[in-house]
Amino acid sequence: MFNLPTEKGKGILVTPTIDENTLVGPTSDFIDDKHDRRSTREHLEEVVEKSNHTVKNVPVRMVITSFSGNRAHEVGGDFILKESLDGFFDCVGIESPGLTSAPAIGEYMANLVNEKLNLEENKDFTYDRKPTPKTSELSLEEHDELIKKDKRYGKIICRCESITEGEIVDAINRPLGARTVDGVKRRVRATAGRCQGGFCLPRVMEIIARETGVNYDDVVKNGKDSYYIKGHVK
């Protein structure tokens, strides 16, 4: 359910997700500092107040975490889909209805790249991808069969989300696999539960280090310089 749109967008929403939790927000403000990504008390209070316009008594005490981000707003309010520099294609200014138009945007940009590079279709390419096993949705019999094939699917790493070692290993080793803790989280939800990695983070880091061949100290949260470990205490 959407609020009446304003110049800032569609307002603060209460959105059920496919993972059976709920997103509340976002706020929308124009800012001068593009590096300012704070979650402030003022904005969180605004989220709570305005979410009650559509859903009464949102259980604020059940909130797991809060986050914010910036998006580039195109002055003319339009999407920019073009080659801006030689070999560099822009796909910017994507705001609502970006989700609805995403499939068409992807096809359009692929055609632009194809015109530039004169690519040939790979006749052997398959659009089918092996689904990631989600053990929490399996029956006891199905889970038992999976464990017989790979015992790592019987070892729970993330208690909050019931994610097994096998699921994390699969997320790392499949094509375009995860290389960061957030990469694992976005694929299989390990560290995304109520404790936010308080229990499973060290174990997830161990698995990433082992499967990718990097040192444990070099495992990052989400890209460059987002290290968890800076040095030894003693």
Image (cartoon, helix red, strand yellow):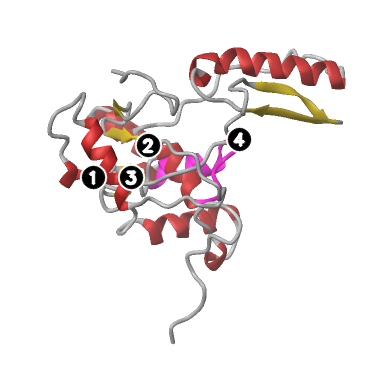
Tell me the SS state at disc 3: helix
Query: Is 174 in the magenta?
Result: yes
Query: How far is mark 1 from mark 2, CA to CA?
Result: 16 Å
Query: Which label sits in the foreground, 4 or 1?
Result: 1
Which residue is at a point 53% across and 58% down the rendered structure image?
A: 220
The residue that disc 1 covers is 63
Query: If the image is split into quadrants, where does the C terminus sit?
Result: bottom left
Query: How far is mark 1 from mark 3, CA to CA?
Result: 15 Å
Disc 4 vs disc 1: Cβ atoms closer than 8 Å?
Answer: no
How many labels, in total?
4
Tell me the SS state at disc 2: loop
Upstream in the sequence, badge 4 or badge 3? Answer: 3
Which residue is at a point 66% across and 14% down the rendered structure image?
A: 107
Upstream in the sequence, badge 3 or badge 2? Answer: 2
Residue 147 is situated, as x and y percent measured from the top left of the image, at 34, 39
Identity, as a three-letter code, of the amino acid under mark 4: Pro
Query: How far is mark 4 from mark 1, CA to CA?
Result: 34 Å
Q: Which mark is residue 27?
A: 2
Tell me the SS state at disc 4: loop
Which residue is at a point 26% across and 47% down the rendered structure image?
A: 64
Question: In this picture, which residue range is highlighted in magenta?
Answer: 165-180
Upstream in the sequence, badge 1 or badge 3? Answer: 3
The residue that disc 4 covers is 175
Upstream in the sequence, badge 4 or badge 1? Answer: 1
Identity, as a three-letter code, of the amino acid under mark 1: Val
Query: Which label sits in the foreground, 1 or 3?
Result: 3
